[in-house]
Amino acid sequence: MFGGHQKGIQVTRQALYDQVWATPMTKLAKEYGISDVALAKICKKLNVPYPWRGYWRRKETGKAVKQLPLPPSADPAKQSVVICRTIRPEAVTALPESVQENITAEQFPEQKITVPDRLMNPHRLLKGHLDGWRSASVDEYGAIQSGSLRQLNIRVSPQHLSRALRIMNALFLALDGRGHPVAIQDGYKKTLGVRCARSLSDIGLSEPDS
């Protein structure tokens, strides 16, 4: 569809809008030679709405779906864009449709993870340990030393502990809310992990040594 556009292809805002509502983002992005994340960013830049997570699946099953209208824009800088290929066709590896949908869905503003100014609604992994961590001693490098804190892969100085706990709490709650449970994994060395689909990954937060 868009072969041979090594130098880029210019697309009007209206044309891009028509395309994203006619072809799934992951497929359209591949035709342009860019990632679906990059295509979503282009749409946001031009204020072009695109289908939400699950839109195409609902449409394929005959369920009612609503196409968002293209809002007017008088900004001359947002009437078109030049899209340059960044991914070679042979380098593209197909991802499962469910994974592609999750990646695209994370681009929506409502999916943004925000860290509050105060620690509220502590995650189950943090409850019951807050007082002990705040009064813990530090090691020779100035980092708080606590067995339970090490299991959570958190290594910070006392002055940054409050912020670290708020960051991790926001991350834990967001992951749980997305169906990716966070837990202390049993084994030779207990460590914090998150399970996404069938994969298990370690996560943590560490303050760089000064």
Image (cartoon, helix red, strand yellow):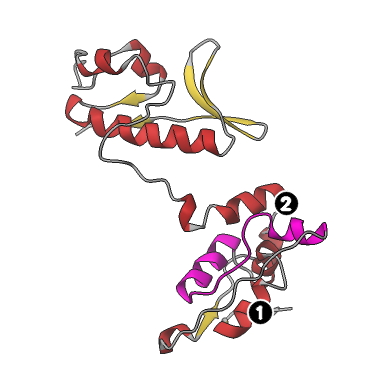
What is the residue that sits farthest to the front in this orientation? 64
Magenta region, residue range = 35-61
Q: Position of residue 34 (x, y in %)?
A: 60, 67
Please give the name of the residue rendered at 30% of the width and 31% of the height, measured from the top-left corner: 119
Q: Secondary structure at mark 1?
A: helix
The quadrant where residue 86 appears: bottom right
Amino acid carrying mark 2 in the image: Glu
Classify 10 Å Cα crowding around label 1: few (below 14), some (14-19), many (20 and above): some
Query: Compared to 165, does 100 lie above or below?
Result: below
Q: Using the image, tell me which numbered label, if any, was put on residue 51.
A: none
Please give the name of the residue rendered at 48% of the width and 69% of the height, measured from the top-left corner: 44
Please give the name of the residue rendered at 61% of the width and 79% of the height, measured from the top-left corner: 16
Query: Compared to 54, does 25 lie above or below?
Result: below
Q: Position of residue 112 (x, y in %)?
A: 44, 50
Mark 1–mark 2 distance (CA, rounded to whole Å): 22 Å
Residue beneath disc 1: 18
Residue beneath disc 2: 97
- Does any portion of residue 207 appear in the rendered image? no
